[in-house]
Image (spheres, rainbow, N blue to C red):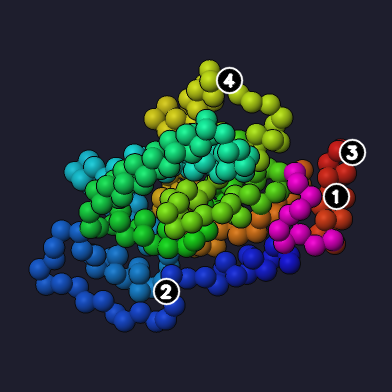
């Protein structure tokens, strides 16, 4: 199945499955309710403009309400790390007491992080931040936003190898916060690089991606991961999602979802051209 099919399916996707009735504007609004401008944008169906409006209102009011967006994204990253570590331990099929204790530790950490995540999300209260987040995250593949895929490729995660792990990673309802791209705990990435990292190296690399130390990079990630937006794009956030696990010039595993023989030959030819040039 070609990647264009995934793209077409994505472009037809909408959180609104039927025409929405016109919303009435309350005579006496409660704090957090939709403004006339937000209602008009929602009824017009321009999701990019709607999310941009919500983001702009958030920028104006954030020092009053202090929604913990950074903290929530950090918690999601921590959850992904421990979830991928749990998967890595399970894949080794090691029944030793040490590994079983490690698994128990990961389960406890994930349990605690899931509750921390819920507490932070509840702190959004009612208003534009919660509505923007709920709209964007209503798509099950929100994390395949082009900006987030590019970030995974830049970090030499699974999206750089075309193995499709970021899409097909098994997620149970109890681990749904763990959707997303590779962390240093990804077993596929560990096998691909061919070496383990020392604790010092691990901490140093983690420091590179600390949201609080990389403000410009963080702003770009927040726009995509929380709002579904990116700079200089007027496309619907949902049209920025690439659901196909096949990426151009992938150099990873041979068994790739959605890659037929013709696509495989085409990709190999492109790889050869890149090598020659």
Q: Which residue is mark 1?
A: 268
Q: Marks 3 and 4, Cα distance to the nearest angstrom? A: 36 Å
* Residue 191 seen in this snapshot: yes
> Could you tell me which residue is drawn at 89 percent across and 38 percent down?
276
Callout 4: few (<14), some (14-19), or many (20+) C-alpha neighbours within 10 Å?
few
Q: Is residue 167 above or below residue 216?
A: below
* Residue 53 seen in this snapshot: no
Q: Quadrant of residue 150?
A: top right
Q: Marks 4 and 1, Cα distance to the nearest angstrom? A: 35 Å
| Residue 18, position as x, y percentages in the image | 42, 81
Q: Nearer the viewer, mark 1 or mark 3?
A: 1
| Quadrant assignment for the N terminus | bottom right
Q: Which residue is mark 2?
A: 16
Label 3 near label 1: C-beta < 8 Å? no
Q: Nearer the viewer, mark 3 or mark 4?
A: 4
Q: Which residue is mark 3?
A: 276
């Amino acid at each position: 199945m070609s990647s264009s099919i995934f793209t077409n399916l994505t472009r037809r996707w909408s959180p609104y499955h039927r025409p929405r009735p016109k919303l009435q504007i309350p005579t006496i609004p409660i704090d957090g309710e939709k403004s006339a401008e937000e209602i008009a944008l929602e009824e017009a169906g321009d999701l990019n403009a709607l999310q941009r409006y919500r983001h702009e209102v958030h920028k104006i009011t954030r020092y009053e309400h202090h929604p913990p967006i950074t903290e929530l994204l950090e918690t999601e990253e921590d959850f992904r790390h421990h979830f991928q570590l749990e998967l890595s331990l399970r894949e080794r099929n090691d029944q030793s007491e040490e590994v079983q204790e490690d698994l128990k530790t990961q389960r406890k950490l994930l349990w605690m992080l899931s509750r921390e995540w819920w507490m932070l999300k509840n702190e959004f209260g009612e208003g534009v931040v919660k509505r923007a987040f709920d709209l964007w995250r209503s798509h099950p593949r929100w994390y395949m936003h082009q900006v987030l895929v590019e970030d995974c490729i830049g970090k030499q995660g699974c999206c750089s190898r075309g193995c499709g792990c970021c899409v097909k990673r098994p997620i149970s309802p109890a681990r749904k916060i763990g959707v997303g791209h590779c962390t240093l705990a990804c077993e596929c990435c560990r096998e691909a690089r061919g070496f383990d990292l020392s604790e010092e190296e691990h901490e140093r690399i983690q420091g590179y991606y600390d949201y609080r130390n990389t403000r410009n990079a963080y702003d770009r990630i927040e726009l995509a991961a929380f709002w579904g937006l990116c700079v200089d794009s007027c496309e619907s956030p949902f049209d920025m999602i690439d659901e196909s696990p096949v990426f151009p010039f992938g150099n990873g595993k041979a068994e790739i979802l959605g890659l037929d023989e013709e696509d495989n030959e085409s990709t190999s030819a492109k790889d050869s051209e890149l090598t020659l040039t």
